[in-house]
């Protein structure tokens, strides 16, 4: 649905030369034309005479039959009718005759690659030569043979026996009468090459019949085919560069047509020229270089000539431009040619030596309105008709249209008004401007001469400016005059500066705040102009079609059919009209346009339009709330009244999710005002359901939607929904259109599984409701009636207990069972033990009741089994079971509670001493709670020596000295205290340092082996691609050692049924045995443990140093302080080496809505730890450098 619009026309008046122009060629390097006349070759100010060397006669009777620019040879080849082939050197301006044919030449044609040249001679032969003018072959044009592509006859009967349709049997004997060529035919051969240079066609007049025939030859000048007999075939001939068809003209008895032939000579399609019989002569047909436009050079039978430009779409030929040059012979075209490099540039030279260049461009002429009144009009020029399509009302595939406008002359330009956007103006080839308005008859505004209109609509830029014209209000008849300022100077604007932003764009349109464009990589992009920059556009288009564009959440991109182009956008709608290469139309809804329109509707609270659009285009309905939660909650009533449909409200409720679609599926643009934060605390689904339900309950027609709001909540309120159904059954509504209980229940069964609904109805303890649900289900009455009858016979509390137990609602069951009296306590106790409902049960009975005591004892037994004996002791003590409480406290080493209970019992002093000694010796010392053990031994067992011994064992030096001097036992200093001091921590430190060094060295070796194995794997079989890192990391676990394979296989069979097995599997994986798959992880864990243990020794070392100095062991103290300092220093230095930078960095996802192509490639190329390593790598230990442990008195 595109038209050809004249972008620029240039006229050159400096080409005046002798004689009349006969033909020209376009120089590809300069863009100028070389014009050949009967006297010379002229280019601007340069003229080379062809008569001086007698190539042409001086009387002007000579003819140049062909001229061709040869840029590789920097020359121009000229062929004359006398038979000379001349090479004109453009650098030296010298002429050289490279060949001569005695019989003369009638045509010259070079192949598209300029490797071959064909010459037709006066003896009706074809001479083929190389570009160096070396003859290849010479054959006759007129041959009796059909050619190598001759059709094969399979012998299926003769022509006389075939069916001839309505013509009857006489058609079999009818002989074809061959009509000779037209009287005005120049009888010269026409030669045309196919675009790939493999075939060329020759149209010539047969000497026997006098009619024209077309023959096709290959590159070796071997005849391929001969055309069928075509009466009225004329001289023009041009092969479509794309290679499919050969264009020619044919004059019928009642029409004049352009016909197309295949390379086998058979006709294949045609279109009719808009002229009467014997009205025009077609001098030439010319295809442009990309085969999109066919130029028809016409000569009227009455004086006057013109050029028509035709295009095809959806198998229909459109007349897009009609250039008329008047009746002046000097203004008539002498030669016409397309530019070889610019597909839409037409060159023309008149007989009066004026060179004209026309630059055309494709343009979709659409209306520019942005409101709902604009009909989204698109006008297509088709000769003297305007085909107008109104896409707001309908999408009509071309060449059909919504309506057409018949004009008195062919249309060259059409445009729509900016204010009244449904009005259009058309400029016709005869200089008229017609203005059409919607619903009004055509109004012809004014008539202008063709020259004035050309200045107005198609200015030629000689002085690089565009002339401004205006309608003169002074004259009675409207006319166009030049716009001048107060001084009389012409007002003009310079040519617009054009900047090439991207070269891969096939079409674009600006609509509202968006730039929509299609690309050659078959995508449709939609950019927001308020945030778009030239750099950003170039980056986006450069990455178009890359891997990162597969993200489905990118609303700016949409894949389209190959070759699609934008026709128009329907204003205030979401429709984008695309045209496919073959001409048919498609309507799409671009996600960016849809979301932008939805946001406008939601901002203006037009919920119905938004809902209908989202429902039709399958946009997630959560966006209605997520776009602006606060506004939605304030406009719930407006939302309900606009939708006014129970089905639509139910659909909205059922699609609710906790996901915020404005951050996941439909991210908001930067400059929009939508809020995605929740308007209130709580879950989104619950907030929306409650808000809608509260509003709907104040109305009378939303019963089913209210049920939906209960069911859709995060925790479905099925009991409440069932109760509402039951109320409808008990109190049926009186309104005519009200929902009955049966309909409500049927709808509820549609939302919820029937078995689940049956269970919840049973949980309401309402047997009428249960029966109502059961009747709607597929359950057999024999299944549920006996059970319900049995329940009806039970006491109410026990009945509810039975129902809750059946539904596995054990807490409710216990609550009801506790109200059934003492006779059911045993059953309650068993329920508590089975379901471990001890805490709930204790709250249901008085604290002074025997049931409470029994429950406490049972709870205590359970806690003891769970290794929580101290809590069990507390329960037993408070319920009066002191003896059992004492046992529980002793078992948990809670010595303070145990002594309290012992005093309460009370225990004799000797038994109390035994209890204290037992607690200290068998419990606390085993747990290394030496200070607490010393307190028990000193105060309750009255054994100071054992207390001091316990303190010395635990290295509590200061407390031990206190007791030594308190009880005057200085002898213990020499026997126990000093020997223990001298043992000290030095041996332990040496062991820790040696182990740390050994593990660190082994870790370096393991890492080196794994890196070597990874590189070897990359060198062998892994392809050179970014994914190679994945292979390397996955294989590094297995390539540490051959011995590690058995661990991999065994670990895969380890069951995870119990925590014991899982712990065993973890220990087995983190083995320090050399060669295991995760040896490096095990070494890291071992090093971390060593560092933690050494760091925890700071307080112990500080206390030991003070004791050593007190008893004058300065040497040992100094060595200990030095050794411990060295150990800490060694650890500090080794930490960065062991825990390398980036080892603990969590790898970000390599794909997602915020990823780009560069980020994905970078994440692939960075080495990443495997999933197993990443989850088990211990964090680097933190040293407590703030703890002071050194003594300054030691050097």
Image (cartoon, rainbow, N blue to C red):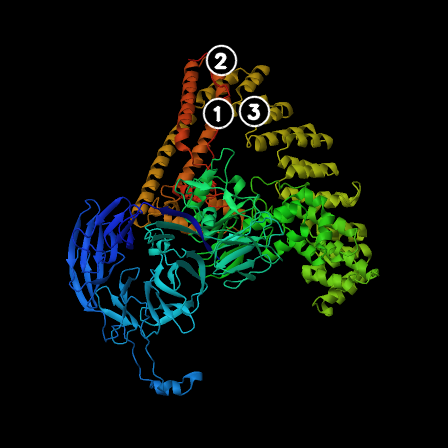
- 518 versus 204 height, above or below: above
10 Å crowding of disc 1: few (<14), some (14-19), many (20+): some
Mark 2: secondary structure: helix
Please name the residue shown 48% across and 25% down the image. Answer: 1097
Which comes before the other along the chain, label 3 or label 2? 3
Residue 836 seen in this snapshot: no
Reading the image, the residue beneath label 3 is: 946
Task: Report if the CB atoms under discs 3 and 2 are less than 8 Å apart.
Answer: no
Query: Is 869 or 22 nearer to us in this picture?
Result: 22
- 1154 versus 282 height, above or below: above
Position of 1041 with respect to 534 (left or right) is left
Mark 1: secondary structure: loop
Reading the image, the residue beneath label 1 is: 1097
Q: Quadrant of the C terminus?
A: top left
Mark 3: secondary structure: helix
10 Å crowding of disc 3: few (<14), some (14-19), many (20+): some
Question: Residue 783: x and y, percent?
Answer: 72, 67
Measured Cα–Cα span from mark 3 to mark 2:
23 Å
Query: Is 187 or 801 nearer to us in this picture?
Result: 187
Which comes before the other along the chain, label 2 or label 1? 1
Question: Residue 647: x and y, percent?
Answer: 69, 58
Q: Nearer the viewer, mark 3 or mark 2?
A: 2
Please name the residue shown 35% across and 59% down the image. Answer: 287
Position of 1170 with respect to 606 (left or right) is left
Position of 283 with respect to 883 (left or right) is left
Position of 461 with respect to 440 (left or right) is left
Q: How many marks?
A: 3
Reading the image, the residue beneath label 2 is: 1110
């Amino acid at each position: 649905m595109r038209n050809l619009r004249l972008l620029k026309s240039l006229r050159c008046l400096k080409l005046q030369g002798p004689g009349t122009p006969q033909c020209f060629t376009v120089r590809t390097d300069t863009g100028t034309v070389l014009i050949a006349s009967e006297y010379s070759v002229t280019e601007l100010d340069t003229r080379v005479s062809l008569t001086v060397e007698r190539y042409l006669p001086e009387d002007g009777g000579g003819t140049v039959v062909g001229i061709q620019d040869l840029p590789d040879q920097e020359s121009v080849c000229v062929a004359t009718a006398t038979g000379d082939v001349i090479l004109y050197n453009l650098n030296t301006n010298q002429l050289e005759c490279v060949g001569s044919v005695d019989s003369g030449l009638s045509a010259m044609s070079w192949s598209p690659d300029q490797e071959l040249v064909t010459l037709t001679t006066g003896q009706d032969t074809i001479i083929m030569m190389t570009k160096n003018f070396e003859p290849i072959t010479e054959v006759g044009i007129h041959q009796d043979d059909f050619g190598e592509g001759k059709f094969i006859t399979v012998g299926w009967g003769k022509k006389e026996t075939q069916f001839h349709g309505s013509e009857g049997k006489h058609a079999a004997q009818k002989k074809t009468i061959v009509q000779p060529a037209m009287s005005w035919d120049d009888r010269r051969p026409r030669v045309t090459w196919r675009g790939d240079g493999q075939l060329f066609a020759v149209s010539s007049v047969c000497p026997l019949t006098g009619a024209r025939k077309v023959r096709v030859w290959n590159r070796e000048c071997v005849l391929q085919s001969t055309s069928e007999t075509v009466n009225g075939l004329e001289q023009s001939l041009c092969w479509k560069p794309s290679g499919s068809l050969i264009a020619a003209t044919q004059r019928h008895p009642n029409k004049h047509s352009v016909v197309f032939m295949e390379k086998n000579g058979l006709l294949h399609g045609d279109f009719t020229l808009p002229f009467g019989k014997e009205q025009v002569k077609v001098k030439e047909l010319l295809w442009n270089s990309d085969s999109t436009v066919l130029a028809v050079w016409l000569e009227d039978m009455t004086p006057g000539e013109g050029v028509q430009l035709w295009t095809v779409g959806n198998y229909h030929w459109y007349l897009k431009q009609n250039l008329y040059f008047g009746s002046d012979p000097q203004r008539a075209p002498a030669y016409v040619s397309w530019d070889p490099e610019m597909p839409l540039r037409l060159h023309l030279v008149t007989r009066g030596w004026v060179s004209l260049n026309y630059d055309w461009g494709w343009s979709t002429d659409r209306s520019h309105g942005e409101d709902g009144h604009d009909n989204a009009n698109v006008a297509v020029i088709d000769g003297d008709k305007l085909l107008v399509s109104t896409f707001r009302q309908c999408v009509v595939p071309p060449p059909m249209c919504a309506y057409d406008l018949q004009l008195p002359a062919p249309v060259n330009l059409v445009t729509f008004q900016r204010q009244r956007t449904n009005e259009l103006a058309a400029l016709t080839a005869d200089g008229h401007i017609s203005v059409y308005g919607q619903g009004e008859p055509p109004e012809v505004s004014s008539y202008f001469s063709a020259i004035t209109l050309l200045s107005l609509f198609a200015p030629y830029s000689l002085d690089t400016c565009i002339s401004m014209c205006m309608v003169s209000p002074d004259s009675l008849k409207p006319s166009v005059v030049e716009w001048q300022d107060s001084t009389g100077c012409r007002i003009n604007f310079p040519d617009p500066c054009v900047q090439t932003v991207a070269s891969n764009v096939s079409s674009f349109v600006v609509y509202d705040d968006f730039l929509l464009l299609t690309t050659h990589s078959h995508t449709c992009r939609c950019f927001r102009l308020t945030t778009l920059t030239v750099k950003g556009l170039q980056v986006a288009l450069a990455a178009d079609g890359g891997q990162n564009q597969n993200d489905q959440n990118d609303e700016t991109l949409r894949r389209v059919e190959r070759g699609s182009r934008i026709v128009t956008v329907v204003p205030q709608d979401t429709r984008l009209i695309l045209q496919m290469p073959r001409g048919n139309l498609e309507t799409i809804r671009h996600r960016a346009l849809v979301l932008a329109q939805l946001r406008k509707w939601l901002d203006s609270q037009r919920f119905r339009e938004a809902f209908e659009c989202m429902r039709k285009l399958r946009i997630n309905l959560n966006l209605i709330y997520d776009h602006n939660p606060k506004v939605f909650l304030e406009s719930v009533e407006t939302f309900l009244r606009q939708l006014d449909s129970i089905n639509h409200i139910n659909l909205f409720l059922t699609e609710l999710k906790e996901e915020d679609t404005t951050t996941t599926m439909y991210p908001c643009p930067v400059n929009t005002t939508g809020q995605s934060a929740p308007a209130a605390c709580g879950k989104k689904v619950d907030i929306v359901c409650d808000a809608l339900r509260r509003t709907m309950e104040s109305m009378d027609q939303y019963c089913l939607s209210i049920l939906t709001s209960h069911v859709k909540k995060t925790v479905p309120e099925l009991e409440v929904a069932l109760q509402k159904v039951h109320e409808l059954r008990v109190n049926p509504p009186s309104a005519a259109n009200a929902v009955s209980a049966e309909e409500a229940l049927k709808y509820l069964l549609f939302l919820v599984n029937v078995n689940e609904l049956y269970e919840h109805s049973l949980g309401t303890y309402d047997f009428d409701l249960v029966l109502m649900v059961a009747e709607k289900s597929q359950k057999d009455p024999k299944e549920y009636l006996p059970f319900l009858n049995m329940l009806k016979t039970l006491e109410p509390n026990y009945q509810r207990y039975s129902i809750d137990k059946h539904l596995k609602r054990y807490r409710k069951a216990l609550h009801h069972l506790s109200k059934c009296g003492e006779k059911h306590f045993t059953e309650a106790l068993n329920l508590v033990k089975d379901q471990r409902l001890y805490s709930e049960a204790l709250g249901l009975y008085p604290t002074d009741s025997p049931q409470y005591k029994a429950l406490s004892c049972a709870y205590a037994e359970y806690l003891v089994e769970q290794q929580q004996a101290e809590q069990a002791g507390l329960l037993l003590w408070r319920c009066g079971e002191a003896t059992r409480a004492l046992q529980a406290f002793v078992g948990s080493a809670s010595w303070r509670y145990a002594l309290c209970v012992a005093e309460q019992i009370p225990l004799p002093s000797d038994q109390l001493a035994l209890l204290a000694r037992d607690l200290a010796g068998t419990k606390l010392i085993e747990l290394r709670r030496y200070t607490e053990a010393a307190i028990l031994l000193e105060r309750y067992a009255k054994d100071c020596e054992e207390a001091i011994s316990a303190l010395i064992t635990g290295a509590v030096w200061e407390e031990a000295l206190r007791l030594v001097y308190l009880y005057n036992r200085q002898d213990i200093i020499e026997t126990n205290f000093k020997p223990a001091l001298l043992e000290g921590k030095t041996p332990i430190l040496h062991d820790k340092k040696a182990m740390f060094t050994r593990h660190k060295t082994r870790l370096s070796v393991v890492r080196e082996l794994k890196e070597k194995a990874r590189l070897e794997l990359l060198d062998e079989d892994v392809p050179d691609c970014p994914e190679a890192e994945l292979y390397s990391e996955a294989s590094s676990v297995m390539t540490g050692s051959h011995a590690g394979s058995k661990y991999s296989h065994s670990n895969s069979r380890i069951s995870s049924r119990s925590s014991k097995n899982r712990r065993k599997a973890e220990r087995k994986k983190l083995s320090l045995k050399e060669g295991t798959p995760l040896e490096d992880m095990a070494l890291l864990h071992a090093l971390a443990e060593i560092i933690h243990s050494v760091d925890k020794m700071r307080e112990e070392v500080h206390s030991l140093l003070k004791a050593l100095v007190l008893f004058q062991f300065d040497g040992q103290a100094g060595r200990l302080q030095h050794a411990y300092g060295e150990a800490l220093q060694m650890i500090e230095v080794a930490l960065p080496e062991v825990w390398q930078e980036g080892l603990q960095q969590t790898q970000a996802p390599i794909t997602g809505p915020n990823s780009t192509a560069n980020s994905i490639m970078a994440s692939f190329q960075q080495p990443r730890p495997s999933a197993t390593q990443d989850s088990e790598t211990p964090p680097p230990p933190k040293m407590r450098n703030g703890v002071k442990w050194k003594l300054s008195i030691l050097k």
